[in-house]
Image (cartoon, rainbow, N blue to C red):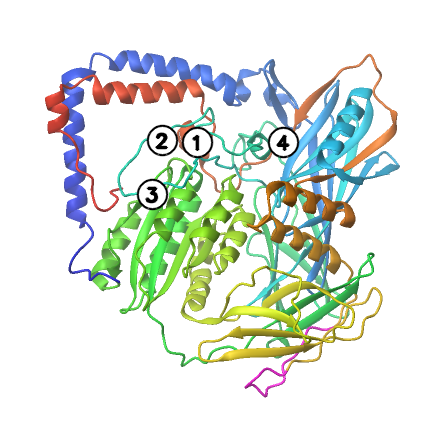
């Protein structure tokens, strides 16, 4: 039950100021009484340890006299700064209807005078199905094979040691991959070509596609046997050598590459030190288009016949942010349904359906809600991201109605609530929350689990829609455990994620929203906040369909993805892939609207080998209007998308053991030639190229830090780049300050009281 704000009010601005004055007074007293004499020693030791840590963890070009004149990327080794392999990324996309086929060419050039092995960690879309690898050495091309991951690693290491050219592509997350290239000769260029497939997003009459070009740093959280009950009190946190929580993620090293210190706005050693990004798109939408644009990059659009377009990036683009492409059909051509089918190499029929259910009228009665806003204020959000996030939250608060209640949770390495109780959305309470948000800054780790736990364990009100708006960049490495937590704790609440910044973790954001039966909204720049949040709140106010299911005309179940099907909101279509059993002629889609049950029967066209088809315009129950459909497009690859989606459903299945999941995922990867958690692509030359008497060194290509990330202004402990010695010494100083320089009576006298709301 919601509590009236008359029973509890958040702290006022004057109370915040009073608390801050009290804190400063307490701090001043103990410093005067016991700490002045040790300050010079602390400073001296801190500077010494900082210098020591910098040698281990930071890149200082000025430490190498020749660094400023080196051409290309630099690689830090224990013996000093050395050249790393140059890298150029070129992407070619072919979009037809709802499916995109892409080729990524990574060009490794060895600028040094020694043989090297190269490694590059890179992102792909979270639904990318990687199924081909080619290694180009001069005019020769070596086609890659799919193998179980451990076998592929063994073959790569054997080739590396024997002097053979080889390439290995591994998946570390559905959106994080790595490429390794063995035995690149001095001055030699090697090209690694990867192909993948993904589906196009369609929502609110807008098609969109995202290509990530950089992996943002991932926070590795604390190990937790059981999720603790989080309160509003402060608790101390322990960090590992990266300034992050003790690693519970076994492959943490694989998803946390060494980043370049210089960005495009800094003084780089040489212009070639940037990682250039070239992107060419062939767009065959199948519909007349009203507009094509990119909110993230400057693009060139060249139209051709039959509603086809060629799109390229302007020169000078670098791999430091997500590329986003949007295209909108002409108003009279907005599709309401589309159905594609394909006969796979295994002989099975695969289907891909997009269907927009009946939409509510504008006069739909508003449903009272309890909204919980959760804001990430960790160190990775510092800079442009926290500005976007705070603006998004303030906008969300301004959209509350008088019969809504709300609360705000903020988190970094611990989570706290703005108020102990749900607050009525009165002007006074909203104003207090707005002030509270304006005072926040980004700092510390990213313990998403604590924030989720606090949000899901709030008191519920059966008379209100329970909705959670989670604003974060999602830069964590423990996604799977968080998905399980959401599934277990969600209940009747709905989780809506808002991705912030130039390179959010799209895998976590989209999957968390899907499991939470909400939606994912991406805000890439601050000028997009109002538009994107307006769209989000339209969804929050207008849930359209829930409890959606599929069945064949004979009543049998459908092998489909997503599993389970998500709730649908305003202007959000159902997009589902499935296997079509022999003899099936009709697919039934059903769900529960706001006032009545809904049933739609989708007629399937006759099966044709390697063909795609569009279903006729559906007649929706209680709607006589005929709606246009997406034009036909011959497109293979629906089987690959189904397989990729099937793997996702296996990973989320709580009834399978870890070994059963591995066995099933490995089998699908091998059958469909896909890179997965347990299968990799490996290409090995037959003959050695490196002389047996020449040694090769391992070199990594440091990626850019995502655009807008202001990590340099944060202390190292907040960003995952600090040393163990610095953290241990800092904690020791805090312990001595808190316990060693005051008497027991003084400590009791000055014990601070825990506030009921977080004080920034």
In the picture of the structure, the residue carrying the numbered disc 3 is: 229
Asked if the magenta segment contains residue 626, the reply would be: yes
Q: Residue at x 77, y 42 (%)?
A: 193
User: Along the polypeptide, which appears first: circle 2 or circle 4?
Assistant: 2
Q: Which percent across, then down, holds residue 403?
A: 28, 69
Q: Dot 1: what SS?
A: loop
Determine contact: label 1, label 2, CB under 8 Å: yes
Quadrant in which residue 306 is drawn = bottom right
Q: Residues within 10 Å of mark 1 (few under 14, many from 20)?
A: many
Determine contact: label 2, label 4, CB under 8 Å: no
Look at the picture and state if 469 lies above or below 411: below
Q: Residue at x 40, y 20 (%)?
A: 726
Name of the residue lying farthest toward the bottom:
624
Residue 747 horizontal side relative to residue 433, left or right: left
Q: Give, as a single range, the part of the protein colored magenta.
A: 619-631
- What distance separates the C-alpha of mark 4 from that of mark 3? 47 Å
Q: Which percent across, then down, holds residue 37?
A: 21, 12
Determine contact: label 1, label 4, CB under 8 Å: no
In the picture of the structure, the residue carrying the numbered disc 1 is: 245
Q: Nearer the viewer, residue 701 or 167?
A: 167
- What distance separates the C-alpha of mark 2 from that of mark 3? 15 Å
Q: Nearer the viewer, mark 2 or mark 4?
A: 2
User: Along the polypeptide, which appears first: circle 1 or circle 3?
Assistant: 3
The answer, for residue 390, to whether it is visible in the render is no
Q: Nearer the viewer, mark 4 or mark 3?
A: 3
- What distance separates the C-alpha of mark 1 from that of mark 3? 18 Å
In the picture of the structure, the residue carrying the numbered disc 2 is: 237
Q: Dot 2: what SS?
A: loop
In the picture of the structure, the residue carrying the numbered disc 4 is: 273
Q: Dot 3: what SS?
A: loop
Q: Residues within 10 Å of mark 4 (few under 14, many from 20)?
A: many
């Amino acid at each position: 039950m919601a509590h009236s704000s008359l029973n509890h009010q958040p702290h006022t601005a004057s109370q915040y100021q009073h608390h801050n004055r009290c804190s400063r007074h307490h701090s001043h007293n103990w410093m005067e009484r016991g700490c002045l004499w040790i300050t010079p020693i602390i400073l001296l030791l801190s500077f010494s340890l900082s210098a020591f840590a910098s040698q281990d963890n930071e890149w200082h070009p000025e430490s190498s006299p020749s660094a400023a004149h080196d051409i290309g990327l630099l690689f830090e080794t224990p013996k000093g700064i050395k050249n790393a392999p140059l890298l150029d990324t070129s992407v070619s996309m072919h979009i037809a209807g709802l499916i995109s086929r892409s080729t990524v060419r990574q060009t490794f050039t060895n600028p040094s005078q020694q043989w090297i092995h190269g490694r590059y960690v890179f992102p792909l879309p979270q639904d990318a199905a990687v199924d081909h690898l080619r290694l180009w050495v001069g005019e020769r091309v070596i086609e890659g094979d799919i193998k179980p991951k451990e076998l592929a690693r063994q073959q790569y290491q054997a080739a590396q040691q024997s002097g053979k050219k080889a390439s290995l592509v591994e998946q570390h997350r559905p959106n994080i991959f790595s490429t390794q290239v063995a035995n690149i000769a001095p001055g030699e260029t090697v090209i690694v070509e990867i192909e993948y497939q993904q589906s196009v997003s369609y929502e609110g009459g807008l098609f969109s596609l995202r290509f990530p070009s950089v992996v943002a740093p991932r926070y590795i959280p604390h190990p937790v046997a059981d999720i603790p009950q989080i309160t509003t009190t402060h608790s101390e946190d322990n960090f590992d050598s990266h300034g992050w929580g003790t690693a519970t993620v076994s492959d943490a090293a694989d998803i946390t590459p060494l980043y370049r210190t210089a960005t495009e706005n800094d003084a780089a050693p040489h212009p070639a030190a940037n990682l250039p990004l070239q992107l060419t798109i062939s767009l065959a939408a199948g519909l007349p288009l009203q507009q094509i644009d990119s909110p993230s990059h400057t693009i060139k659009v060249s139209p051709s016949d039959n509603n086809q377009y060629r799109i390229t990036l302007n020169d000078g683009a670098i791999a430091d942010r997500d590329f986003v492409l949007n295209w909108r059909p002409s108003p009279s051509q907005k599709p309401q349904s589309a159905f594609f089918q394909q006969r796979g190499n295994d002989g099975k029929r695969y289907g891909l359906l997009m269907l927009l259910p009946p939409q509510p009228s504008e006069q739909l009665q508003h449903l009272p809600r309890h909204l919980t806003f959760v804001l990430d204020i960790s160190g990775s959000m510092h800079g442009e991201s926290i500005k976007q996030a705070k603006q998004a939250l303030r906008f969300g608060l301004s959209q509350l109605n008088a019969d809504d209640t709300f609360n705000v949770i903020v988190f970094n390495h611990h989570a706290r609530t703005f108020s102990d109780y749900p607050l009525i959305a009165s002007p006074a309470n909203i104003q207090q929350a707005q002030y509270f948000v304006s005072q926040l800054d980004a700092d510390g780790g990213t313990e998403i689990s604590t924030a989720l736990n606090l949000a899901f364990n709030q008191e519920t009100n059966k008379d209100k829609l329970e909705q959670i708006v989670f604003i974060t960049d999602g830069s964590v490495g423990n996604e799977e455990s968080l998905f399980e937590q959401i599934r277990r704790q969600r209940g009747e609440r709905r989780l809506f994620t808002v991705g912030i910044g130039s390179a959010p973790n799209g895998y976590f954001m989209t999957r968390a929203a899907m499991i939470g039966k909400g939606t994912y909204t991406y805000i890439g720049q601050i000028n997009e906040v109002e538009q994107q949040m307006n769209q989000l709140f339209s969804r929050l106010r207008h849930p359209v369909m829930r409890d959606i299911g599929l069945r064949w005309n004979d009543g049998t179940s459908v092998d489909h993805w997503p599993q389970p099907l998500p709730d649908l909101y305003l202007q959000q279509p159902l997009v589902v892939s499935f296997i079509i059993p022999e003899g099936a002629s009709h697919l039934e889609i059903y769900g529960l609207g706001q006032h009545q049950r809904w049933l739609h029967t989708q007629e399937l066209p006759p099966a044709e080998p390697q063909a795609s088809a569009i279903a006729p315009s559906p007649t929706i129950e209680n709607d006589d209007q005929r709606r246009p459909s997406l034009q036909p497009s011959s497109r293979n690859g629906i089987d690959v998308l189904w397989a990729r989606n099937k793997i996702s459903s296996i990973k989320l299945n709580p009834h399978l053991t870890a070994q059963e999941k591995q066995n099933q995922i490995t089998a699908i990867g091998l059958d469909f030639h896909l890179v997965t958690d347990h299968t990799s692509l490996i290409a090995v030359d037959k003959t050695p190229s490196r002389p047996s008497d020449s040694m090769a060194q391992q070199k990594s290509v440091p990626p850019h830090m995502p655009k807008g990330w202001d990590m340099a202004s944060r202390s190292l402990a907040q960003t995952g780049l600090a040393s163990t010695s610095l953290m241990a010494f800092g904690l020791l100083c805090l312990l001595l300050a808190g316990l060693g320089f005051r008497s027991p009576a003084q400590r009791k006298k000055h014990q601070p009281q825990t506030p009921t709301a977080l004080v920034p």
